[in-house]
Amino acid sequence: MSKDYYDFIEAVDKKTGINLSLYKEAQMKRRLTSLYEKKGYTSFTDFYSSLNQNEKLLKEFLDRITINVSEFYRNVKRWEVLEQKILPDLLNGNNHIKIWSAACSTGEEPYSLAMVMLNLLPASSFTIIATDLDASAIEKAQIGLYSERSLAEIPINMKRKHFINQGAYYKISDEIKSCVSFKQQNLLKDRFESQFDLIVCRNVMIYFTEEAKDLLYHKFSGALKKNGILFVGSTEQIFSASKYDLLSADTFFYRKQSN
């Protein structure tokens, strides 16, 4: 790691609480170099000097380091497994389900969870918490306005039931919005709530170092109830699940073994 970049990530950590050393260096460095060159800077030192004084530039920087790519029912076959196999098992003998959508981006994932849950239970029988590092992504999620592309994999009956077409966009229904509570969170630094029946964290771990992944899997495991489920992305298989007191429940689903 070059001194220029090392000094930059140290300064960013002190200013924002975001530790960029826990993200894969090559990917993050490439993304940030592209940003500062586009803005006319020639080094991380000069770039940070401006970040420290310019709120608009700081916001753009934070948007760039948080990867907001999402869609409803992403990898739809996994959602079918969730609805048909995983959730019925979790509901057995459980009168209230507590769910966390971690790194929820602009809301497609937690709103998908709300749609699935309303197929099975009244809204009073489940809680969905959704968190993300990026405050602007959370603001977009709370507005609940989406392009046609975001809805590409959503079942047609769900689209008709829960969205209102507004020209080039679709607005999520107030019923679905009311099922999800959003808040800002730094996964790597903040403490987690506990006693979750289901934690969904998909297509985020690929950006982290092995050290950061290890930390997060331990934290996620600690936040689950016994027999609770961690649902991960389609490129994020956990090869040493037992290390985290987890056992495979299905492809990309892991069950907590004990408290």
Image (cartoon, rainbow, N blue to C red):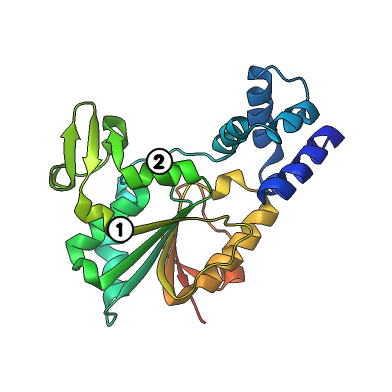
Seen at 29% across and 67% down, the residue is 87
Q: Position of residue 10 (x, y in %)?
A: 78, 45
**Quadrant in which the N terminus is drawn:** top right
Q: Quadrant of residue 128?
A: bottom left
Give, as a three-letter code, the residue at label 2: Ser
Horizontal side of 6 relative to 61 (left or right) equals: right
- Which amino acid, by three-letter code, is at mark 1? Val
Q: Nearer the viewer, residue 141 or 215?
A: 141
Side of 106 where 34 appears, left or right: right
In the image, residue 244 sits, relative to residue 166, either above or below, namely below
Give the residue at x 27% y 83%: 93
- Is 122 placed left or right of 149 in the picture? left
15 or 235: nearer the eye?
15
Quarter of the view holding residue 122: bottom left
Q: Is 64 located above or below residue 212 in the figure?
A: above
Mark 1 — residue?
A: 81
Name the side, left or right, on which 195 lies relative to 172: right
Marks 1 and 2, how far apart at CA: 19 Å
Disc 2, SS: loop
Where does the image place residue 160, in percent across and percent down from the top left?
Answer: 13, 43
Q: Quadrant of residue 180?
A: bottom left
Mark positioned earlier in the residue sequence (1 or 2): 2
Decide: few, some or many residues near mark 1? Use Cα within 10 Å; few <14, some 14-19, many ≥20: some
**Helix or strand or loop: what does disc 1 sit on?**
helix
Task: Residue under label 2, please give it.
Answer: 70
The label shown at residue 204 is: none
